[in-house]
């Protein structure tokens, strides 16, 4: 079983929804309102997320942030993965699907462990 913890990967998965919302809104101020987070917290989350990449994900255009092509492609992939995670959790919680989709790496093991601990 793989260990996908932040300690092992260096990736804080809590930063993903913040990144996606900044891309959607085009500004940290608007994203902070939608996420119900302070502007400094959103700014710090974006800074931490940017550190995972070799090149910037946004260009500043006045008050707005314009995502790069790399950021747009990444957002598309991350939105699909986040949707699959939410769908799998909802399916398990509703009792319709006792086994999460097998096409999400690592999710099957996570969900099986969480079900067995209940």
Image (cartoon, rainbow, N blue to C red):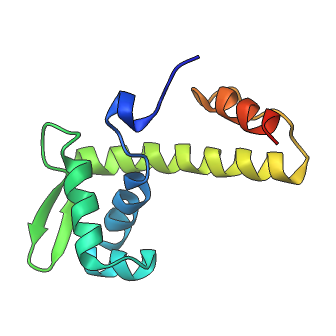
Quadrant location of the C terminus? top right
Give residue 112's position: percent from left, percent from top: 75, 30
Give residue 25's position: percent from left, percent from top: 34, 73
Identify which residue, 96 or 116, lies in the foreground: 116
Give residue 30's position: percent from left, percent from top: 33, 81
Residue 55: which quarter of the image? Answer: top left
What residue is rendered at 23% in x and 74% in y? 40
Identify which residue, 75 or 38, lies in the foreground: 38
Above-or-below relation of 45 to 99:
below
Above-or-below relation of 18 to 94:
below
Q: Is residue 39 visible?
A: yes
Find the residue positioned furthest to the top. Answer: 1
Find the residue positioned furthest to the right. Answer: 95
What residue is rendered at 28% in x and 60% in y? 45
Q: Is residue 81 left or right of residue 53?
A: right
Quadrant location of the N terminus? top right
Identify which residue, 75 or 102, lies in the foreground: 102
Residue 32: which quarter of the image? Answer: bottom left
Above-or-below relation of 34 to 105:
below
Find the residue positioned furthest to the front. Answer: 117
Q: How many circles with numbers are drawn on the protein?
A: 0
What residue is rendered at 81% in x and 45% in y? 92
Give residue 42's position: percent from left, percent from top: 29, 69
Q: Is residue 68 visible?
A: no
Q: Is residue 4 left or right of residue 51?
A: right
Q: Is residue 84 left or right of residue 56?
A: right
């Amino acid at each position: 079983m793989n260990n996908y913890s932040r300690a092992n990967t260096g990736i804080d998965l809590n930063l993903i929804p913040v990144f996606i919302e900044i891309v959607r809104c085009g500004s940290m101020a608007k994203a902070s309102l939608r996420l119900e987070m302070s502007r400094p917290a959103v700014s710090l989350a974006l800074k931490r997320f940017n550190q995972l990449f070799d090149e910037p994900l946004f260009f500043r255009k006045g008050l707005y942030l314009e995502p790069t092509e790399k950021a747009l492609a990444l957002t598309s992939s991350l939105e699909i993965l986040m949707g699959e995670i939410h769908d799998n959790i909802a399916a398990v919680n509703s009792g319709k699907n006792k086994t999460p989709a097998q096409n999400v790496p690592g999710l099957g093991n996570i969900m099986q462990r969480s079900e067995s601990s209940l």
